[in-house]
Amino acid sequence: MSEQTEINIFTEELVRQIRAQDQFGTWGKLSDDELLTKKYVVTKEDLKNIPMIADIDEMKTADIRMIFQAIALAFERKTGVMCNVLMEMSHEGFGRCAVVADKVVISDKYFKDAHRFGYRTLEKLYDDGEKLLNKAFTIYEQYKPCEK
């Protein structure tokens, strides 16, 4: 793992999620950076080969959900507050994913053309995950339920 991914708790949790789902050891020989690149990096050349209109497959839906599960679990580890991931996705790739802590929606993203979802570089994945997680902490602090 590179130095950047070690300090990013989102990335650590995302790698844990992917490796936990690897029942047959398919990803076992890849480094964490290689694994994340294969799963989430979509270059401009890759996008040229993906049609504008197409159905989303279950693997891509699971990969998107895994990002939000990583946010939820990283949030839980830092705060101790249990989170749920809610995802609704049509077969055409339109939908929404949200992370809920207590009664507060701490992360929410709408998708269209989700079959084309990906990051141009690994660094953009790291940055986006860290931004989503930091925003989740800020939102929760602002709206968390009052203690009785």
Image: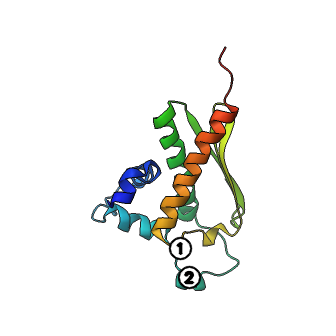
| Label number found at residue 120 | 1
Badge 2 amino acid:
Lys
- Count of all numbered marks drawn on residues in the image: 2
At 69% across and 80% down in the image, what residue appears? 52
Query: Whole-percent x and y of residue 1?
Result: 32, 59
Above or below 30: residue 99:
above
**Please, what is the three-letter code of the amino acid marked with disc 1?**
Arg
Secondary structure at badge 1 equals loop
Mark 2 sits on what residue? 44
How far apart are labels 1 and 2 at the CA level? 7 Å
Judge the density around disc 2: few (<14), some (14-19), many (≥20) Cα neighbours within 10 Å: few
Q: Residue at x 52, y 79 (%)?
A: 43
Compare residues 89 and 105 and report the one nearer the observer: 105
Mark 1 or mark 2: whose residue is earlier in sequence: 2
Q: Which mark, residue 105?
A: none
Q: Quadrant of residue 136?
A: top right
Horizontal relation, residue 117 to residue 41: left or right: right
Which residue occupies 69% across, 64% down? 91
In the rendered image, which quarter is residue 58 located in? bottom right
Viewer-nearest residue: 9 or 34: 9
Residue 95: x and y in percent read 71, 58
Q: Residues within 10 Å of mark 1 (few under 14, many from 20)?
A: some
- Residue 7 is left or right of residue 79, and the answer is left
The answer to whether residue 40 is above or below residue 46 is above
Quadrant position of the C terminus in the picture: top right
| Farthest-out residue, top | 148
Residue 141 location, x and y as percent?
Answer: 63, 34
Where is residue 117 drawn, in percent x and y?
60, 68
Write the residue at 39% across / 57% down. Answer: 5
For the residues bearing labels 1 and 2, Cβ distance under 8 angstroms: yes
Secondary structure of the residue carrying numbered label 2: helix
